[in-house]
Amino acid sequence: MSYTKATFISGFIEPVVSIQKQTINDNDFNKILSSLNALMTIHENITKGNEQVAELWNEIISDTISSVHSASSGFYRLAILALRSVLELACSALYFFDHEIEYRLFQQHDLKADKYVSTLVNEHLFFTTKYIKTFYETIDSEETSENSVSTFLKKIYAELSDVVHGRYKTLTKVNGLEIKYNKQLFKFYEEKFLRTLSIVTVMYILRFNDKKDKEIIELANFSGVIRL
């Protein structure tokens, strides 16, 4: 089959519009949208007067919106791929916030982006209890267990990577190239979306000790790794 403008409209544009309408009508978007709003607030707070990390956080917001759009359009695996990018970028942004020289090297010399989430945790103790304690002394009384944040980080990153690499049979296309709405896959995505944004929010709260916004606190508590 070769595509023309007409077949592209009938085969992609029109089905996507139909899927978007089905997705909106068939699902409660309140949790997704409130989580997105919380992330936008974090973006505003963390980039205010801080050009060093603004560029990365702009990409985080862009990828998050792209992820929601893809999921609501029936592209569930692509949406998960964008979520993994959100998690990677958020971890990098928080890591580079405390490693300005490394960020400048990364930026000025176009170094390879090889600080994956698992690498940060395993080789740099990223957001382990010891790591958090250097800037948040009361973590012992608020973490649900030792290293609960870093353990959750590695777990959700592994789950997102499994989907990206096609290990979940439920995300495998079985109807050729036909795009279809699938509520089960959308709910699967929604759970991954909320957990990903939740752990990003947890890291933000701990690193900057910001507990003023109720929407941010509510999103952070979703992961169950800290008690706020």
Image (spheres, grey):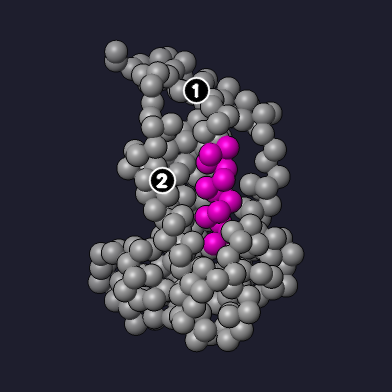
Helix, strand or loop under label 2: helix
Magenta residue span = 187-199
Image position of 131 with respect to 9: above or below: below
Residue 108 is one of the magenta-drawn residues? no
- Residue 81: numbered disc: 2
Q: Amino acid at mark 1?
A: Lys
- The answer to which of 31 and 147 lies nearer the viewer is 147
Q: Quadrant of the N terminus?
A: top left
* Residue 78 quadrant: top left
- Within 10 Å of disc 2 (Cα), the crowding (few <14, some 14-19, many 20+) is some
> In this view of the protein, can residue 179 be seen by the observer?
yes
Image position of 72 with respect to 225: above or below: above
Q: Amino acid at mark 2?
A: Leu
Kindly report the distance in space between the C-alpha atoms of the residues bearing marks 2 and 1. 19 Å
Q: Are marks 2 and 1 in contact (CB under 8 Å)?
A: no
Helix, strand or loop under label 1: loop
Image position of 54 with respect to 14: above or below: below
Q: Residue 88 location in percent, x, y?
A: 41, 60
Which residue is under mark 1?
180
Of pointers 2 and 1, the one earlier in the residue sequence: 2
